Every structure is written in C-alpha cells, then in structure tokens.
Amino acid sequence: MGAPGFVMYEEEFKLISAVLEKLVKDSNSRMVFLVDKNGQLIAAAGETENLDTTSLASLTAGNIAATGGLAKLLGEREFSILFHEGEKDNLHINLIGQRVILVVIFDDRSTLGLVRLRVKKCSEELAAIFDRLMKKAEAEATAGQASPFSEITDEDIENLFRE
Amino acid sequence: MSFINYSSREINCKIVYYGPGLGGKTTNLQYIFEKTNPQARGKMISLATETERTLFFDFLPLSLGAIRGFRVRFHLYTVPGQVFYDASRKLILKGVDGVVFVADAQEERLEANIESMENLKQNLQEHGYDIDKIPLVVQYNKMDLPNAMKAEELRGQLNPKTWPEFSACAKSGEGVFDTLKAVAKLVLQELKSGK
C-alpha cells in the first residue's frame, strides 16, 4: 500500500503549538494553521474560534495540490509560497518540507514583509520538529511499538456503526 | 494516509468516492450530509461549475464515534468524474485510505464505468497504491432506473475481484450508508492489521 500513517505525539504537539503561538505574536497576524498536505488540520493558534478550521484545512490542501500540479506543468518543482490578498484579511501559505502547509491569516495590523520574515524563521523550527517526529515514528514502528489500533477488536468496529 | 493524533486522541482517515461523470458520487455525499446528525458532521464543501458538475472536489467531514478512547473521523471526498479532469482526480486521490467506486448502472454507461475503473487503477498506482490491496467497495448506483443492468452483469464487468458491493439509489438514499459503513470498516480493519 502507500505511505504509512502520519503520527502526532503529545510532546511534539506542544512544541509545535508553542512555535505557532509565537508566530502569531511576532507576525501580528490574526491566526496561524498547520495543515497536513492531505488536508488534515495539525495545529492552530490565534483567533480561531469562529472559523471552520476543518474546511480551511481541506481547501488549503486542495489549493496547494492544484498549484503543485500547475508548477509541474511549468517545469517548476513546486510553488512553495502562495499569497492571497483580500479586502480585509490576507492569506499567506507556504510549504514546509514536503509534508506540511503553514497558513497565516493577517489583516492591516501586519504586513506581508513582516509575515514572510517571521514565517521564514518559524519554518526552520517547524521543519526540525517534523524531522524529529518522523524519526520518532519510524523508531517506534521498528521497535514494534503497539499502535492504538492493535488492541481494537472487530466488535469495537461493529459498535461504531451500531445505531 | 491516516493521521493519528495522540495529543487530541483522534484518528483521521480519508475516503474518496470515484467513478464516471454523473454517476452519483456527489449525490452520495449530499445524502450523507442531509441524513447525518449535525453534531456528527461538518460543512459540506463543493467546488463545482455553474452547472453543478464537480470541478475539483466535494468534501464532507464525519465523526463516527470513538474507539478505545480515540475519536474516529472520516474525511469523505469525491473526485470530478468527467474524463478531462484526470489531473484533478490524481491530486484528490493522494493520501487515500479507502475508495468507494460509484458505478452508474445504466447500460449505456458501462464503457464509462470500465474506463473509470481502469483510470482509478492507474492513478492509484502512480501514488504507490495497489488497487488489489487498498480498502475498496463498489456501489452500483441508479439501480432503480429502467435501463439499469442487473447486478450480476455489472459484477462480471466491474467487480471480478469480488470487492464488497452494494446496489443503491443515491437519490433516495438506498444503499448509501451501507456502502459508507462497509468502506469505513475495511479502512479500520486495515489500520488494525497494521499494514
């Protein structure tokens, strides 16, 4: 089958959340999201209460996938940064490694230049955390660490669909 | 590709509805959206043309409950079925955990079904998946129509490998949830087996 699943541990999640909180402050942005390239929301920080973050994650991944397709058509490896300017809010999207998308939503309290500056530093920190995460997941898989699925019984699965 | 979040105790999986144009993929999702408790689902996103043909994808997040303390979420996607949207179909298939092939049971759509199934096989291969190993369920949709082929005939043409199959009428909802439950179970069983 394809690639193995993506795993997030508590320790790394805390590190990632701290980096995102710092990015919100340092870039004067409204909110920041980290999205898996397959459309899953990994983490968020800032004024996220009134936003449909699930849809945002899926649409962002679709956006990146589509522009990735365009890039290949043009002979580029990828377009690693996307910027969408709105009337009130702006969207800055960039790829981190080959796996993760960082989304920054900012208004006139910040500037594109400041966001790009802060994102650059933050991307390096996040890339290091994700490297560590991958290695940890690989090590646990090699050590035969039980996944949460290994104890699931067929009855557990049936009960999920019982009305 | 499934996403296990130990921090938020969540498991997320991706299911893609595939098949020829106007076969009923979007209708499946629309029915699921209408009939699911709002607490158990999110908003349905449809990126479509003005004539309501899927342009890029439909998306519907579902919460199915919890297993062993982990919330189980499925993200349902449909692909655009029209032949010339192949580039988009490839993108949407990335990271898939399970596939529902929605076949249009009408006799005149048999060639389109076969072509779409072959297209699915190729696009899965490009992502490193094997159609014979990935959780897959076949739905024969529009079985209520007078020109619908018999399930046995459709099986012979589209499902020689005997994947789980369901007859359906997505408009009325018949077979829609049976199909979804079947593919979700296959995905969870696959995760359980650790492959």
Image (cartoon, coloured by chain):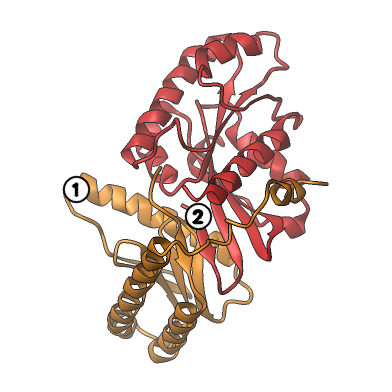
Chain colours: A orange, B red
- Three-letter residue code for mark 1: Leu
Quarter where residue A54 is shown: bottom right
For label 1, the residue is A74
Q: Label 2 neighbourhood size at 10 Å, few (<14), some (14-19), many (20+)?
A: many
Q: Residue at x 54, y 45 (%)?
A: B190
Q: Position of B78 compared to B173: left or right?
A: left
Q: Secondary structure at mark 2?
A: loop
- Whether B28 is drawn above or below A58: the answer is above
Quarter where residue B139 is shown: top right
For label 2, the residue is B2
Residue sitting nearer the eye, B188 or B173: B188
- Three-letter residue code for mark 2: Ser
Picture disc at residue A103: none
- Marks 1 and 2, how far apart at CA: 31 Å
- Whether B77 is drawn above or below A76: the answer is above
Q: Which label sits in the foreground, 1 or 2?
A: 2
Res B106 seen here: yes
Q: Position of B52 compared to B130: left or right?
A: right
**Residues at marks 1 and 2 on the same chain:** no
Residue sitting nearer the eye, A160 or B74: A160
